[in-house]
Amino acid sequence: ALETDMGFDGFTAMTDPSRADVDQAGERCRHAGIELKMLTGDNLITAQAIADELGILDAEHIAVEAREIERLSDEELQKRIPSIRVIARSTPSVKMRVVNALKSLGNVVAVTGDGINDAPALKHADVGIAMGITGTEVSKEASDIVLLDDSFSTIVKAIQWGRGIYENFQRFIQFPLTVKLSSVIVVLASI
């Protein structure tokens, strides 16, 4: 009796907005030549909406569900993985296959994760990055790096600093070699 003669007033929707610095961090990644892929447990429509909001998807890249990845052989996955940017309803086995496919194509693969289901991919990636605040102990143990602030922009800053240190090492090694090589050439020419 209570549910008769009711009128529709409206509905409420909730969203979990992305952090303010994620857009800028994603853009910096693209300019630095880092390709972002999003593997999520969300459904395809939600994953596409988030990816569109973050600028991950464009005309040349697609979003797929994990069951499509499961149907592919390893060779087919290697051919298709460059065009796939978002994988919805991801499972631990799909995450592992994606990591292995990217590594077999010669990519350096970094994986971020916070759950138990992320642990295999974190372990097999070149660099596993676990969330320090929201991450499970399993993901922290499986990773190489634990972020203390759970912020994606911290990863981007770490990459920037790491590349700077690497370039400084190259310069540090290149300078003495150049000087010593020129000294050897002068001595040999003099002899």
Image: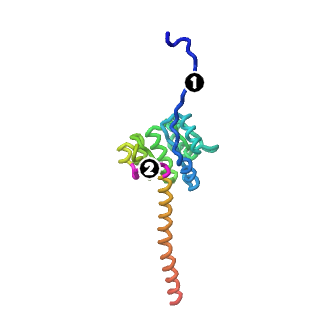
Q: Is 75 within the magenta?
A: no
Bin the neighbour count of mark 1 within 10 Å (Cα to Cα): few under 14, some 14-19, many 20 and up. Answer: few
Asked which secondary structure carries label 1, the reply is loop
Q: Position of residue 42 (x, y in %)?
A: 50, 35
Numbered range of the magenta stretch: 143-153
Q: Which residue is mark 2?
A: 125
Q: Nearer the viewer, residue 37 or 153?
A: 153
**Kind of residue at badge 1:** Gly
Q: Give above or below for 100 relative to 165.
A: above
Which of discs 2 and 1 lies nearer the camera? The answer is: 1
Asked which secondary structure carries label 2, the reply is loop
Q: Is 147 within the magenta?
A: yes
Bin the neighbour count of mark 2 within 10 Å (Cα to Cα): few under 14, some 14-19, many 20 and up. Answer: many
- Contact between marks 2 and 1 (CB within 8 A): the answer is no
The extreme top residue here reads 1
Q: Position of residue 71 (x, y in %)?
A: 51, 36
Residue 76 in which image quadrant: top right
**Kind of residue at badge 2:** Ala
Q: Position of residue 16 (x, y in %)?
A: 50, 37
Q: Earlier in the sequence, mark 2 or mark 1?
A: 1
Tag of residue 98: none
Q: Which residue is mark 1?
A: 10
Q: Residue at x 44, y 50 (%)?
A: 125
